[in-house]
């Protein structure tokens, strides 16, 4: 028969994990995962912190052991291909304002344009960069201090999603962790704040990793947000009271670079490292050329180090007898080097799905067909990103519709909304304008405006056109009225 202690121990060991325990375990597993390492590499390579910066020139020392050669050139040439390709993709797809199309009321359109304004579009570009560097980016839905519905980007290296499905389309819960400095008496310490979000609210607690325990007596469940409503205070007087509320969904939305959530650096790291290494080695060889290999006969000196110092300082060396100094030149196979570097560069742009602006295909004035062919890889990658971001914006729209229903009482959730990305492709403007003019009467005015190279914001341009039409109609009516008055001699023929 089991003792009470054994029963309690068995219950403890087989009890379900608490949210705190789940959060700590998931955080630690994530920080030791390959996914997390690739995220850190993606951010490092975007900032031009590549592998070549850790390079050392090594030689065989005494006993055959390798040792660093500090007297040899060790140039570390970094090429920002990852940064260029990431900026190229975000600039191409997300730099221009996107358009919002909907059959909803004017009030709904105005609300959407206010919420998805310039601030949001700048965030969309930045979360796009986060997604390409890390494989996935995150936006949190919250209310600011003024009570406005807002969004903010959460660093991907601080996020652990718990998905409902294997396709990673819907969140079951979300864990965020971040470092924070706190004071204990006069001592400043660094702790980790962990947040566990689900549809029931959020739990926050402080964790220091020591003994795998929670440092402070916190961790009470809170709400996603709070609203201020009329109520009564303790004395029965009318006042404003704060009421906590939760969304029906976890208020975090993923923005993926691709379905596999694979960052760009994972596809290109080996190519970029080889390019940096070969270029740096070539630079080292060029710098080492003046220090050719010396063949010394009957050298009358203490050691080779002294000889090299004499040659560097006095440009001479003392020999004895029939001695002399010859040199062996270091030859560089320029053709092989150039061929290898050209192939590497092409491979980086091909597998990075970008546009090599130094390619011979550009020419002086390429046609629209040539430009479309040049941009085909970038366009294919942009299509994948756009498909993922369209789904993400649809998830964000759910929160927007809920917010509008809570604040206005009007339900817009059944109204279709389309987000149109306007790509910043280099085009032959004359050819594009001609095609637009030839499409008048065939395509809608909105589609024509969206494809005109001089259009910035389609909706603003349509509003300007409508305003100009009304103004022209009013002027035409005024002219007709003035002409009629002139024909009648300015006389009022109405009888008394």
Image (spheres, rainbow, N blue to C red):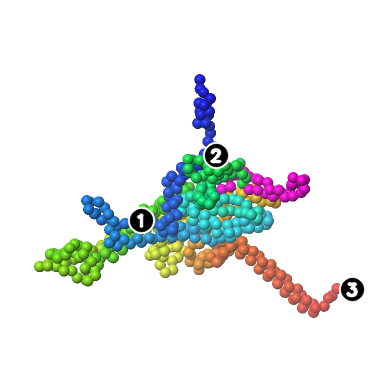
Give the percent coordinates (x, y) of residue 426: 48, 64
In this rendered view, identify the residue nearer to me: 128 or 311: 311
Q: In the rendered structure, which disc, 3 or 2, sits on the residue that comes first in sequence?
A: 2
Between marks 3 and 2 in the image, the one whose residue lies nearer the viewer: 2
Magenta region includes residue 414: no
Instruction: State which tag comes first along the sequence, 3 or 1.
Output: 1
Q: Residues within 10 Å of mark 3 (few under 14, many from 20)?
A: few
Mostly what secondary structure, the magenta segment?
Answer: strand
Which residue in the protein does label 3 denote? 496
Q: Is residue 368 left or right of residue 196?
A: left
Residue at the disc numbered 2: 19
* Measured Cα–Cα span from mark 1 to mark 2: 41 Å
Q: Magenta segment range? A: 225-252
Q: Is residue 368 left or right of residue 343?
A: right
Secondary structure type for disc 2: helix
Secondary structure type for disc 1 = helix
Q: Residue at x 47, y 50 (%)?
A: 135
Q: Position of residue 244 (x, y in %)?
A: 66, 45
Q: Of tags 3 and 1, which is closer to the observer? A: 1
Disc 2 residue crowd, few under 14, some 14–19, many 20+, Cα 10 Å: some
Give the residue displayed 58% in from the left and 60% down from the top. Answer: 118
Residue 217 coordinates in the image, percent (x, y): 57, 42
- For the C terminus, give its image quadrant: bottom right
| Residue 460 in view of the camera | yes
Task: Classify 396 as above or below 327.
Answer: above
The tally of labels here is: 3
Label 3 sits on a secondary structure element that is loop
**CB under 8 Å between discs 3 and 2:** no
Disc number for residue 469: none
Which residue appears farthest toward the top when viewing the image?
A: 1
Reading the image, the residue beneath label 1 is: 54
């Amino acid at each position: 028969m089991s003792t009470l202690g054994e029963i309690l121990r068995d219950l403890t060991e087989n009890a379900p994990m608490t949210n705190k325990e789940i959060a700590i375990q998931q955080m630690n597993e994530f920080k030791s995962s390959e996914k997390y390492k690739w995220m850190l590499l993606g951010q490092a390579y975007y900032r031009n912190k590549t592998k070549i910066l850790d390079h050392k020139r090594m030689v065989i020392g005494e006993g055959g052991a390798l040792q660093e050669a500090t007297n040899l050139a060790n140039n570390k040439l970094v090429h920002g291909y990852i940064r260029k390709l990431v900026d190229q993709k975000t600039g191409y797809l997300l730099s221009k304002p996107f358009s919002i199309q909907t059959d909803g009321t004017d009030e709904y359109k105005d609300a959407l344009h206010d919420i998805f304004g310039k601030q949001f579009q700048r965030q969309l570009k930045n979360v796009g960069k986060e997604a390409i560097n890390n494989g996935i980016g995150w936006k949190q839905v919250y209310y600011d201090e003024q009570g406005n519905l807002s969004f903010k980007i959460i660093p991907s290296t601080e996020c652990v999603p718990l998905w409902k499905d294997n396709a990673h389309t819907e969140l079951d819960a979300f864990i965020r962790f971040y470092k924070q400095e706190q004071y204990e008496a006069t001592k400043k310490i660094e702790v980790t704040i962990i947040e566990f979000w689900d549809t029931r609210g959020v739990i926050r607690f402080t964790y220091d990793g020591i003994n795998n325990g929670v440092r402070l007596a916190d961790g009470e469940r809170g709400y996603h947000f709070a609203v201020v409503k009329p109520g009564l205070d303790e004395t029965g007087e009318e006042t404003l009271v704060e009421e906590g509320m939760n969304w029906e969904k976890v208020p975090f939305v993923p923005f993926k670079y691709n379905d596999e959530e694979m960052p760009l650096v994972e596809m290109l790291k080996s190519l970029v490292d080889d390019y940096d290494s070969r270029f740096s080695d070539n630079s080292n060889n060029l710098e080492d050329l003046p220090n050719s290999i010396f063949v010394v006969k009957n050298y009358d000196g203490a050691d080779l180090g002294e000889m090299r110092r004499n040659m560097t300082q006095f440009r001479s060396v003392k020999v004895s007898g029939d001695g002399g100094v010859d040199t062996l030149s270091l030859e560089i196979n320029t053709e092989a080097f150039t061929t290898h570097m050209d192939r590497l560069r092409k491979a980086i742009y091909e597998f990075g799905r970008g546009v090599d602006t130094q390619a011979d295909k550009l020419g002086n004035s390429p046609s629209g067909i040539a430009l479309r062919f040049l941009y085909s890889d970038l366009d294919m990658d942009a299509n994948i990103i756009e498909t993922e971001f369209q789904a993400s914006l649809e998830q964000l729209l759910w929160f927007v519709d809920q917010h509008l229903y809570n604040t206005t009482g009007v339900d817009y959730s059944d109204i279709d909304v389309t987000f149109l990305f306007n790509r910043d492709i280099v085009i032959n403007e004359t050819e594009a304008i001609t095609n637009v003019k030839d499409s008048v009467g065939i395509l809608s005015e909105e589609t024509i405006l969206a494809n005109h190279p001089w259009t910035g914001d389609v909706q603003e341009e349509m509003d300007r056109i409508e305003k100009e039409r009304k103004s022209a109609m009013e002027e035409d009516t005024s002219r007709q009225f003035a002409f009629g008055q002139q024909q009648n001699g300015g006389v009022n023929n109405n009888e008394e």
